[in-house]
Image: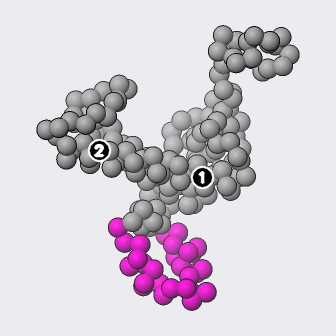
């Protein structure tokens, strides 16, 4: 458990909060969801790094825990969509008047997915000192990769003045 090694020591050393109080304070919060996931519970990404991707690091324990919760939340969303008869590739969340409670629960779950995704990339970006995280991915064995954007000249914003010597396409 990450909390016993990292956060609890900090709180106890500085006498900020007793361990029991801290544990009680985080119950039923996102902290409880990520801090009590152990290495045996981590969900390893299955995608393999592609030829256009450069490995730039590996996730630490906290990032692995956040990724695991994020992945589990995505699976919940996919299962709910399937139960509702919605193809996940064509998702549009519309408020349905007669099914408002179910829609609100689904919107809440989507907010959690977005939160954990942003938290994951924030943690990785800060640790690796990367300001632009939009072109990063996570691959098998928790490797972090930089993804080379796939563009052709028709999509390139430089196409008006491009001579191929100023861009990588």
Q: Is residue 145 magenta?
A: no
Q: Earlier in the sequence, mark 2 or mark 1?
A: 2
User: At x 53% / y 79%, what residue is drawn?
Assistant: 8
Q: Is residue 8 magenta?
A: yes
Q: How dense is the environment of label 2, judged by Cα within 10 Å: few (below 14), some, or many (20 and up)?
A: some
* Label ID, residue 106: 2
Q: Which residue does the numbered mark 1 point to in the structure image?
A: 122
User: At x 41% / y 72%, what residue is drawn?
Assistant: 26
Query: Is residue 76 something that shows in the picture?
Result: no
Q: Position of residue 5 (x, y in %)?
A: 57, 75
Q: Which residues are magenta?
A: 1-28
Q: Quadrant of residue 162?
A: top right
How many numbered discs, if any? 2
Q: Position of residue 12 (x, y in %)?
A: 56, 86
Query: Is residue 88 something that shows in the picture?
Result: yes
Q: Position of residue 69 (x, y in %)?
A: 43, 53
53 to the left or right of 8: right
33 or 40: nearer the eye?
33
Q: Position of residue 102 (x, y in %)?
A: 21, 44
156 or 82: nearer the eye?
156
Q: Secondary structure at mark 1?
A: helix
Q: Quadrant of residue 22?
A: bottom left
């Amino acid at each position: 458990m990450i909390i016993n090694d990292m956060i609890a020591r900090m709180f106890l050393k500085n006498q900020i909060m007793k361990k029991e109080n801290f544990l009680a304070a985080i119950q039923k919060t996102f902290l409880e969801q990520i801090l009590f996931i152990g290495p045996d519970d981590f969900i390893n990404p299955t995608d393999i790094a592609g030829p256009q991707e450069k490995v730039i690091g590996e996730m630490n324990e906290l990032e692995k825990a956040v990724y695991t919760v994020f992945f589990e939340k995505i699976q919940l969303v996919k299962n709910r969509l399937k139960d509702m008869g919605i193809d996940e590739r064509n998702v549009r969340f519309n408020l349905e008047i007669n099914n408002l409670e179910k829609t609100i629960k689904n919107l809440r779950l989507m907010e959690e997915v977005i939160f954990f995704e942003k938290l994951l990339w924030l943690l990785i970006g800060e640790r690796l000192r990367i300001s632009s995280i939009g072109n990063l991915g996570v691959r098998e064995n928790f490797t972090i990769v930089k993804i080379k954007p796939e563009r052709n000249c028709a999509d390139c914003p430089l196409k008006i003045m491009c001579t191929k010597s100023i861009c990588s396409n």
